[in-house]
Image (cartoon, grey):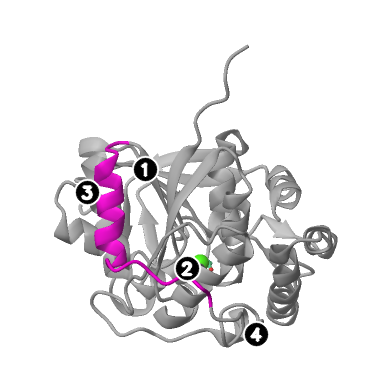
Amino acid sequence: MSSAAAARPVIIDTDPGIDDALAVFLALASPELEVIGLTSVYGNVSIEATTHNALCLLELAGRGDIPVARGAAGPMASAYRGAIPHIHGDDGQGNANLAAPAAVPQAAAAHDWMYARAAAAPGQVTLMALGPLTNLALALQRYPDFPAVVREIVLMGGNALCPGNASPAAEANIFNDPEAADLVFAQDWPVTMIGLDITRKVVLRPADVDAIVSRDTAPARHLSTALGFYQSFFASTNRLDGLFAHDPTAVAYLLDESLFNLSRWPVCVETEGISRGKTWPYVGAGGDEAPQPWRQRPPVAVATEVDAAAVVRLIVERTC
Ligand code: BDR
Ligand code: CA
């Protein structure tokens, strides 16, 4: 009998965020993954709130031992656009107002911390990015060998062949820091983009939410408040009977890649005008065939299709 594969070490870079909370709980509940740390980033709420939430979520899951490093307070080249309380609540967690955590963040900033952890085990650490890509871009700028020490990047963000959600053109995580995202897509390292093309198809229906929150655990009790708030947002704005599981879908990719179809396209990010934050793939033949500015770019694995029912099952079975 073959022994179980070793758990894959993962750092989750996150702006919790209600779907981030679901993603973190899913990752923590999955033996295939070893969550070695969370790095916070501004986004759904301020960096103070996302850092607080990251610490609280780990404590709720009984994993207050996992380190949290505080990250960027705003984008690299523009001002932070501010929180989105109508989607995630004033606190980022559906107004659950989680109590002060016992743990405190690491002394090191997120981009230094994630580099140090990756460099300590070259080629092993996966970065799961669930917010604006500012921390990753800062690490790229400071540490030229960062791409060489990271195993791969799996990010929730972008929209290849479909409209955005933060603007008609752009998805929220990329919209928050297009310059950082463009740096990440320009690097020669393995990047998988789990974007709106598929995450809008992964819908947790009320019965799915009920199945998760009815469990007798601290994370489930928290999600009962948080997911209720999130569902109300989608009901009122998207007329959706359920919620988009954006960030948990990126975790599901690490758990079972066979549920996803990927296309390998170079990606550039628009940084100007009304399409700021739009992720543009070049979908023709690559290499010298590609026009500028795509020609010099390495291909990104862009998720284009998903077995949404199977991903929903995975999220519901595992979370909490
Ligand atoms: C992404 O934006 C954030 O609001 C969510 O947490 C998710 O990471 C979806 O566009
Ligand atoms: Ca997020």
Numbered-mark total: 4
Q: Residue furthest front?
A: 102
Mark found first going from the N terminus, 2 or 3: 3
Q: Which mark is residue 258?
A: none
- Pair 2/3: label in front: 3
Mark found first going from the N terminus, 4 or 2: 4
Q: CA distance from mark 2 to mark 3?
A: 26 Å
Q: Amino acid at mark 2?
A: Glu
Labels 2 and 3 touching (C-beta < 8 A): no
Q: CA distance from mark 4 to mark 3?
A: 37 Å
Q: Residue at x 48, y 85 (%)?
A: 83
Q: What span is in magenta?
A: 101-123
291, above or below 18, in the image: above
Occupied quadrant, residue 89: bottom right
Mark found first going from the N terminus, 4 or 1: 4
Residue holding disc 1: 125
Nearest the viewer among 250 and 95 is: 95
